[in-house]
Image (spheres, grey):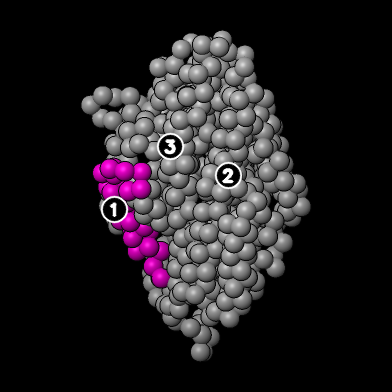
Amino acid sequence: MATITSAGVRAHAKPKGAPEHGGDHGRAPMTHRQIMKALSGLLLGLFAALLSSTIVTNALPTIIKDLGGGQSAYTWVVTAALLSLTASVPIWGKLADLVSKKALVQISLVIYIIGSVIAGLARSPAMLISARVVQGLGAGGLTALVQVIMAAMISPRERGRYSGYNGATFAVATAGGPLLGGVITDTDWLGWRYCLFVGIPFALIALVVLQKTLHLPVAKRKVKVDWIGAFLITAAASLLLIWVTFADDKYQWLSWQTCTMVGGTVLLALLFVFAETRAAEPVIPLRLFRNRTITLASLASLFVGVGMYCGTVFFSQYFQLARDESPTMSGVLTIPMIAGMFVSSTVSGRFITSTGRWKGWLVSGGVFLTAGLGLLGLMRYDTPYWQLALYMALLGVGVGMMMQNLVLSTQNQVSPADLGAASSVISFFRSLGGAVGVGVLGSLMSTRITHYAADTIGDLPPDAQAAAAHASGSGSLPDMNLLPAPVRTWLESAYGHGIADVFLYAAPSALLAFLLCLFIEEAPLRTSVGLAQPAEKQAA
């Protein structure tokens, strides 16, 4: 005889010897109002975490000049947060399968707040980069846990509707962060430090809201943290990202340092795989990859991450250094990308909930993302803005359609016991792709800008060539307003062409994501929440 429990789970008489679970009795299914209240706290926390990753992009030229850093520091401020976020996501996801999800998301918010305070008080590039690592740890928890908690509250069939809110939050924070950062940087009585403080109020409000509204059943499971696996995956991801960040700056791509770091990454990855086959509670259960959908979605997320972070990191440099726009205007000019992500994530979520079909949105997103990146690869410093707006909108539409639906397709394939690990796998690969992509593409961008500058310096008048050589060889970001007009135009052209190459190089990754999505099998979306699945299987 079945009865309805307090968590909205259809419960049956417990067989003799069945394990006890606590906290999932005595509650009615969550109403739309209750879900939205809890979701508001989650999305506030996610907004704060994502804001910290993007709000500095338009402020970075000012930050690096103020702290006395160069292009390497510019890249590392972004990469450091991505590194710690990427390495920690699987750990947060696995912990969510073992202990209280509510406690974990609150801990990640506290870590984020601590990192933000330190970052805002930084007095050197090294201190700022270290603080960004702490911020990334907190952001990694929020990135992983929001998806897991949503899956615990909402069925896959209904999740498309609510994932639209998640996608919209991601769109506003990812693309709107640079706009807010530019406004803060350009405001005399604020300054760039407030870019790093601004997420703290959102995080504090999220803590209060979650404490009042988030009430999830907690399964009584013995906690066995796979510390060896956690260490190995963190070390492997960190060594890989350190290699791609310093390559072509501190050493050549083909060098003994490269051989050492790549070899070390491969060795650590193999040791991780070996450790996971022996662990009682592996960080990433390798059996998940026996499922074709999860494997393909993970690889597609890796390549989507390249295009997604490419759009949010390099536009600020393009608009400020190739088109001489202020930090504020650099954010305003990316609004077409924000609109594309917002509309596509929201609309696709609504349609998926009403129809139950999601693969078409994934495949279409791959087409839009590839087209957007490829067309942005054709831009120059003087390309008409209406063309750029169209290309950015295509990029945003593609990311909005693919990002959340890759997570949805994976969550629809796993049992509740693996929900956290499976969700974090997708986030891990997306963040890894973004971090590696930013590192590699940032290095290639510097090389291409130098190449185009050297290739065209002979076109300048002889009296301007000395100033041009000094501006391009100083190792720091140039102040365009201090350069003579011919030199300024010459350098803007080099930046425009070099940054365009970044998008052109990222386009094949989007094409690979599209091809992988073609082979993902569309399975019907379940109509039960994660917590209800064991009871349904027992009934069957």
Can residue 120 be found in the magenta stretch?
yes
Type of amino acid at the residue the image marks with label 3 = Gly
Residue wearing tag 2 = 248
For disc 3, the marked residue is: 70
Q: Residue at x 48, y 47 (%)?
A: 79
Query: Along the polypeptide, which appears first: circle 1 or circle 3?
Result: 3
Residue 272 rendering spot, x and y as whole percentages: 58, 71
What is the span of residues highlighted in magenta in the rendered image? 99-127
Q: Is residue 116 magenta?
A: yes
First-in-chain label (3 vs 2): 3
Q: Could you tell me what secondary structure mostly forms the magenta stretch? A: helix
Label 2 amino acid?
Asp
Considering only order in the chain, which callout, 1 or 2, is on the residue closer to the N terminus? 1
* Residue 128 x/y as whole percent: 34, 46
Amino acid type of disc 1? Ile
Mark 1, other Cα within 10 Å: few <14 / some 14–19 / many ≥20: some
Q: Is residue 462 above or below residue 191?
A: above
> In whole angstroms, how far apart are the C-alphas of marks 2 and 1?
33 Å
Residue drawn where x is 62% and y is 29% of the image: 451
Q: Is residue 186 visible?
A: yes
